[in-house]
């Protein structure tokens, strides 16, 4: 593996960051479309208020975001998207159980976003490998199982998941731009992401 | 002598009664308004009665004891109205640093007003630092970015006659609106009669265009037409217009938007430019040498629909040869009409 600060590594980083920014942009656009579909199909009010911190859903909000190191950004992003992968898989399963084939469009849209989230997670893992840190193992970053919820609560939770994912997509593009701008990550040991 | 000087606020249309300090009702007094004696018809004993007051009746009212002309009472009457619901606007033109809120009253009250603003994000109350100038604005620094929690801003306006308030609720992304691009410049391109080179700069208020890039929207039209052409540009701060009508003056404007969030800025200051045109040449034919009338100075402008020298063609020397040939043809055509 090239040293993190070698010219080829710098080129790879910029390339991965550029592609990641485009992925994040496409993902956000699709999540916003999915949000419209989800709200309509689930009979929700688009302006419905969801609890600020839905259990198990990674929150995109960050304090002192501009002070984060590149590695911190990557680790937080990776932990978030791994969590979203599990959450979206669960939503897909619930949607199939609840609506079956009656709403194939919603199922397809959920599956498409799930695929993008998986792809983005992989992309982040590549960037972490390039930073010579390597991604943390999946088990450590896995979210705890969600609480048992009634149908309406599940729908609201799904709304919260998608809204937060849309925020993460914007944040991720910004994080990758910062990463591309800042060059090699700091030499300080990466701090593990906080568990949700 | 006893005097009592203070400010008295009354609503437009109210009936106002002023007592002459501690003077008895039946005391002989004289009232003045801004130094001018008030007619006795406005008096009820020593009380001054002003019915259905209007804005013109604001001023200094003084009461003097009849014979001694000692000043017994003085007040400054301010006629006004309680505040209507204020208009509040919040916007971030310097994302991700923070946002500002500004406000105004839809109609004046004609008396002093005080404004109080509160900003709540979730359960946290944030400080909105008031600007010295303009006074109807305050700034908030973002403590968090990428939050889905909405901001709730409540503005209360109070004056001596009443109060009113309004609330605005929004999320972080929705209020992001950059200032218009700056230093817009449009120049003709030498030897290119259908091109205009436009350049601009990021608004200086946008703190970090590298990490938070802007995209741009350019619009242009010849002055003689009403319809705009539009071009959206995802990066860079310049663009070459390649389909301008030759010889026509153009008006050009640019707007900016964060690449990912928020809304478009207002349009920039408009700039004007005219594409390059060829200097008129004098043709050296025998007919022209023997002419006794003034020299012909016809200039030939290719019609706007001319495609020969279009952007698709003007690439490399081959296309230049095509353009030159077209010029000769047109010149020959023009000679026929001299």
Image (cartoon, coloured by chain):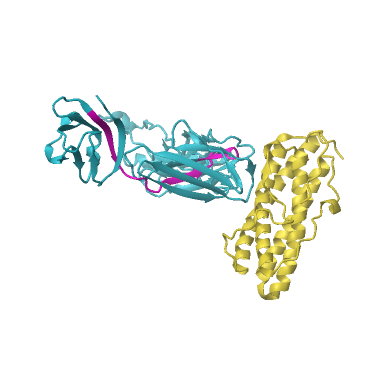
Chain colours: A yellow, B cyan
Nearest the viewer among B193 and B196 is B196
Q: Does the magenta stretch include residue B216?
A: no
Give the vertical position of A149 relative to A65 (above or below).
below
Task: Identify which residue is drawn at 67% across, 54% down.
Answer: A164
* Left or right position of B204 against B271: right
Is residue B242 among what the camera can see? no
What percent of the width, then of the height, locates residue A148?
A: 75, 66
Nearest the viewer among B6 and A66 is B6
Q: Does the magenta stretch include residue B88?
A: yes
Give the vertical position of B231 relative to B201 (above or below).
below
Can you tell which quarter of the image residue B328 is in? top left
In which quadrant is the N terminus of chain B drawn? Answer: top left
Q: How many labels does the image show?
A: 0
Give the vertical position of B262 relative to B97 (above or below).
below
Is residue B153 among what the camera can see? yes
What percent of the width, then of the height, locates residue B257?
A: 54, 44
What percent of the width, then of the height, locates residue B102?
A: 46, 41
Can you tell which quarter of the image residue A73 is in? top right
What percent of the width, then of the height, locates residue B196?
A: 47, 38
* Left or right position of A157 against B235: right
* Left or right position of A161 against B178: right
Q: Give the range drawn in magenta.
A: B72-100
Nearest the viewer among B309 and B267 is B267
In which quadrant is the C terminus of chain B drawn? Answer: top left
* Left or right position of B91 against A60: left
Nearest the viewer among A68 and B315 is A68
Task: Identify which residue is drawn at 44% across, 31% down.
Answer: B133
């Amino acid at each position: 593996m090239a040293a993190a600060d070698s010219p080829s590594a710098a080129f790879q980083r910029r390339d991965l960051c550029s592609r990641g920014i485009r992925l994040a942009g496409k993902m956000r656009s699709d999540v916003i479309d999915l949000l419209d579909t989800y709200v309509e199909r689930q009979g929700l009010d688009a302006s419905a208020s969801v609890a600020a911190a839905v259990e198990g859903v990674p929150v995109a909000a960050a304090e002192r975001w501009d002070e984060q190191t590149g590695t911190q950004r990557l680790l937080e992003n990776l932990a978030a998207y791994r969590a979203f992968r599990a959450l979206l898989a669960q939503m897909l399963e619930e949607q199939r159980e609840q609506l079956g084939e009656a709403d194939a469009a919603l199922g397809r849209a959920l599956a498409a976003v799930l695929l993008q989230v998986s792809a983005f997670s992989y992309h982040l893992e590549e960037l972490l490998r390039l930073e010579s840190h390597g991604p943390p193992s999946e088990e450590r970053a896995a979210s705890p199982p969600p609480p048992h919820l009634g149908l309406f609560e599940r729908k609201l939770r799904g709304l919260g998941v998608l809204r937060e994912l849309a925020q993460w997509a914007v944040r991720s593009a910004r994080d990758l731009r910062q990463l591309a701008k800042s060059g090699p990550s700091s030499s300080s040991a990466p701090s593990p992401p906080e568990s949700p | 002598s006893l005097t009592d000087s203070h400010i008295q606020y009354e609503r437009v249309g109210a009936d106002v009664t002023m007592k002459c300090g501690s003077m008895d009702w039946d005391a002989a007094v004289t009232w003045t308004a801004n130094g001018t004696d008030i007619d006795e018809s406005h008096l009820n004993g020593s009380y001054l009665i002003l019915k259905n007051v209007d804005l013109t009746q604001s001023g200094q009212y003084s009461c003097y004891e009849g014979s001694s002309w000692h000043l017994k009472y003085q007040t400054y009457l301010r006629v006004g109205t309680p505040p209507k619901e204020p208009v509040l606007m919040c916007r971030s033109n310097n994302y991700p640093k923070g946002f500002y809120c500004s406000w105004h009253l839809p109609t004046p009250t004609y008396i002093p007003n005080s404004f109080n603003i509160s900003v709540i994000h979730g359960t946290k109350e944030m400080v909105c630092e008031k600007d010295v100038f303009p006074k109807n604005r305050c700034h908030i620094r973002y403590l968090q970015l990428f939050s889905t929690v909405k901001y709730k801003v409540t503005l209360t306006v109070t004056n001596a006659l009443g109060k009113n308030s309004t609330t605005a609720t929004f999320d972080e992304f929705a209020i992001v609106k950059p200032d218009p691009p700056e230093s817009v410049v449009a120049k003709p391109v030498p030897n290119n009669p259908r091109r205009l080179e436009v350049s601009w700069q990021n608004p200086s208020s946008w703190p970090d265009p590298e990490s938070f890039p802007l995209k741009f929207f350019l619009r242009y039209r010849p002055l003689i037409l009403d319809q705009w052409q539009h071009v959206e540009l995802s990066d860079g701060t310049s663009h070459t217009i390649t389909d301008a009508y030759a010889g026509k003056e153009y008006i050009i404007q640019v707007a900016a938007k964060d690449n990912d969030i928020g809304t478009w800025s207002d349009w920039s200051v408009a700039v004007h430019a005219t594409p390059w045109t060829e200097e008129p040449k004098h043709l050296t034919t025998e007919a022209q040498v023997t002419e006794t009338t003034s020299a012909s100075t016809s200039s030939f402008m290719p019609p706007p629909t001319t495609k020969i020298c279009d952007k698709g063609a003007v690439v490399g020397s081959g296309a230049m040869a095509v353009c030159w040939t077209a010029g000769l043809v047109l010149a020959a055509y023009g000679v026929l009409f001299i």
